[in-house]
Image (spheres, helix red, strand yellow):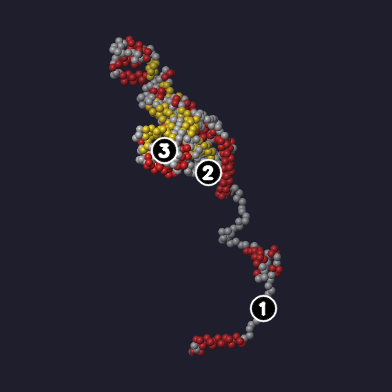
């Protein structure tokens, strides 16, 4: 066992420590004999521009060299070829300081930027052209129309329940105020009358209202009606002038009083319509044939008066839907008239083209709609403000395409009555069918909502613009635009098939039933059906361009031999040429030989009257084969016919 093993741990540690101390005292310290190099400074360094790849850059690492000079030296060193060897592994390792020329190659990004620049340039060109076009519209003078005058006093009838009347009425300073409560008696007898809402009937307009109270059998006269009921008593979509339906939750006494006072005085408005009863198809021979204008009026200003209609000018507020749906043009929009609206449209598009404007989008809008936001997005959008959107009919839309528009939009805002919007959609559906058959896109004509993004039709088809002025009559304007489009689109289709209800079409005659009685000729308001009997041959002619598909002929035909066919002949000459629908041999009088009636009529009369007591003899039955003069002569000479009280003059 060694000595270290016998010693305790602390003793061994102490002994070894003392030995090391003794050895350290005996050995002399070792002195470093390496010479000390001098510290280099910036002054000792070579000029940076003299350095190259063979230079020694280690001196710049001396502690006496400034950081600025050392960094310049390192930058110079790293720019030498030895430090610029790419391994090709880094995504940025390629040299992007120089590019190979692309030649004819155009990248997607380049295309996008080029397109953006072109669009910006095109927008500005179109916007400048639009400004020139709108200046023409602003300077256009519309022909004036007659005026309708109202004279309104301060007689006010307020109708509402107890809550409405007590909240709104006591503080209002209106001298001639009559209160009608619809829910029991009011405290302190505030109301003049107490009645249920359903027992009230209101007729009239500003200055001439009549309020009928059924339970009192009284009729109240008023200049202004203030309806405070939750639902208006007058259910028409467009309320009469002077009829205020107010929500009490949104009004206060001062606001109500201000609105009432503003209606006191003398007022005037344009007469918006003209009516030609000579071409009206409303009723024939006591049979109601057409009621389109009555059904389409949201103000209930049009009523039936026998075989004609009557428009109450004081109720008419210029909605224009009546003129749009009238098939014959008997009722026309007067302010502005069709010719003014069409010529304004034509001049606007003409000015736009002269200023190098691109594909034009015509947007009809009412006065309540502000198009500024859309104009900032679309430089080729041409807004045309109309009195009411409902006045824009098929003739104006089709004329817009003939005058050079590539797209026509009817912008419907919240102010457009629902009834008018329904009629407009119906007419535009008809016109869209026609556009497709002409070779255009149906989407080029549309009704769009002001609450949604404007839909633009790509690759819209447009034609060389017509320079013809707008006709005064509705159907003439429609045909003029149609003929221009057919010619410019090189449409080779003979006839366009259209939906039922369209005011263009033909008539089909069942020859086995038709007796050529010509009752249809007398009933036709458009003079489309004509009697050709003056040619000594019983014939029924049709000029299809005059047919309005009103149904007067089919409803008045005693034989039920007529069927309507909605269509439109695209060729102008064929459309205006008379076409024979039915003909018969002329029956000659058996006495004088003069033709006087269709053969089929004589045969049918003999068949139906042979059992009649007045025609029980062969001679009497033969009188049906005589003309009027010969028939009277034969009766006088027939002793059998003169028996009794027979009077040949009756």
Number of the front mark, 3 or 2: 3
Report which quarter residue 304 is drawn in: top left
Q: Position of residue 249 (x, y in %)?
A: 43, 44
Q: Position of residue 467 (x, y in %)?
A: 55, 31
Q: Mark 3: few, some, or many residues within 10 Å (few <14, many ≥20)?
A: many
Q: Position of residue 38 (x, y in %)?
A: 69, 74
For marks 1 and 3, the one nearer the N-term is 1
- Is residue 337 found left or right of 213 in the rendered image? right
Q: Residue furthest front?
A: 188
| Residue that badge 2 annotates | 373
Residue at point 59%, 48% (across, down):
104
- Is residue 59 found left or right of 106 in the rendered image? right
> How far is the residue under mark 1 from the one under mark 3?
120 Å
Number of the front mark, 1 or 3: 3
Which label is found at residue 158? 3
Judging from the image, what secondary structure is the residue with disc 3 in?
Answer: strand
> How far is the residue under mark 2 from the one under mark 1?
88 Å
Q: Mark 1: few, some, or many residues within 10 Å (few <14, many ≥20)?
A: few
Mark 3 in CB contact with mark 2 (< 8 angstroms): no
- Quarter of the C terminus within the rendering: top left
Residue at point 38%, 25% (across, down):
286
């Amino acid at each position: 066992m060694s000595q270290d093993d016998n010693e305790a741990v602390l003793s061994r540690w102490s002994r070894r420590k003392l030995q090391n101390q003794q050895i350290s005292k005996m050995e002399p310290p070792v002195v470093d004999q390496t010479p000390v190099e001098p510290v280099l400074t910036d002054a000792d360094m070579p000029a940076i521009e003299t350095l190259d790849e063979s230079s020694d850059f280690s001196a710049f690492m001396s502690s006496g060299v400034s950081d600025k000079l050392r960094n310049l030296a390192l930058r110079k060193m790293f720019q030498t070829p030895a430090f610029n060897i790419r391994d090709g592994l880094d995504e940025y390792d390629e040299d992007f300081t120089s590019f190979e020329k692309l030649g004819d190659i155009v990248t997607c990004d380049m295309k996008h930027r080029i397109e953006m620049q072109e669009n910006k340039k095109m927008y500005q060109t179109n916007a400048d052209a639009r400004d020139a076009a709108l200046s023409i519209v602003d300077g256009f003078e519309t022909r004036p129309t007659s005026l309708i005058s109202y004279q309104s006093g301060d007689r006010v009838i307020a109708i509402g329940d107890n809550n409405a009347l007590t909240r709104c009425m006591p503080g209002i300073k209106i001298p001639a105020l009559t209160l009608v409560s619809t829910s029991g008696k009011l405290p302190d007898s505030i109301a003049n009358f107490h009645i249920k809402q359903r027992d009230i009937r209101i007729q009239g307009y500003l200055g001439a209202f009549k309020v009928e109270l059924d339970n009192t059998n009284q009729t109240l006269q008023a200049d202004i009606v203030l309806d405070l009921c939750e639902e208006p008593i007058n259910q028409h979509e467009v309320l009469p002038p002077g009829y205020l339906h107010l929500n009490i939750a949104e009004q206060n006494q001062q606001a109500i009083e201000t609105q009432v006072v503003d209606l006191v005085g003398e007022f005037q408005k344009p007469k918006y319509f003209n009516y030609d009863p000579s071409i009206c198809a409303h009723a024939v021979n006591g049979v109601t044939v057409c009621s389109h204008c009555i059904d389409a009026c949201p103000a209930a200003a049009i009523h039936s008066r026998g075989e004609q209609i009557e428009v109450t000018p004081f109720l008419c507020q210029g909605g224009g839907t009546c003129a749009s749906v009238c098939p014959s043009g008997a009722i026309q929009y007067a302010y502005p008239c069709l010719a003014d609206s069409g010529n304004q449209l034509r001049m606007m598009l003409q000015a736009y083209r002269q200023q190098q404007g691109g594909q034009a989008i015509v947007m009809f809008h009412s006065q309540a709609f502000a198009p500024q936001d859309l104009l900032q997005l679309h430089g080729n959008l041409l807004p045309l403000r109309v009195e009411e959107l409902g006045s824009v009919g098929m003739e104006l839309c089709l004329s817009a395409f003939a005058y050079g528009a590539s797209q026509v939009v009817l912008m419907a805002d919240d102010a457009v009555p629902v009834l008018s919007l329904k009629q407009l959609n119906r007419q535009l559906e008809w016109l869209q069918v026609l556009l497709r058959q002409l070779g255009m896109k149906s989407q080029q004509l549309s009704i769009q909502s002001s609450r949604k993004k404007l839909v633009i039709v790509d690759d819209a088809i447009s034609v060389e613009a017509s320079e013809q002025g707008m006709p005064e009559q509705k159907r003439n304007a429609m045909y003029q635009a149609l003929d221009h489009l057919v010619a410019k689109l090189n449409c080779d289709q003979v006839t366009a098939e259209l939906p039922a209800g369209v005011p263009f079409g033909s008539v089909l005659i069942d020859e086995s039933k038709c007796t050529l009685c010509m009752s249809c000729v007398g009933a036709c308001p458009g003079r489309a059906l004509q009697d050709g009997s003056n040619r000594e041959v019983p014939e029924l002619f049709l000029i299809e361009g005059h047919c309005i598909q009103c149904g007067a002929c089919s409803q008045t035909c005693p034989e039920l031999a007529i069927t309507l066919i909605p269509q439109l002949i695209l060729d102008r000459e064929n459309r205006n040429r008379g076409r024979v629908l039915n003909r018969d041999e002329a029956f000659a009088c058996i006495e004088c030989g003069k033709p006087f009636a269709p053969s089929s009529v004589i045969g049918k009369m003999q068949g139906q009257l042979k059992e009649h007591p007045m025609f029980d003899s062969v001679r009497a039955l033969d009188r049906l084969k005589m003309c009027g003069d010969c028939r009277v002569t034969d009766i006088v000479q027939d002793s059998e016919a003169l028996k009794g009280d027979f009077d040949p003059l009756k």
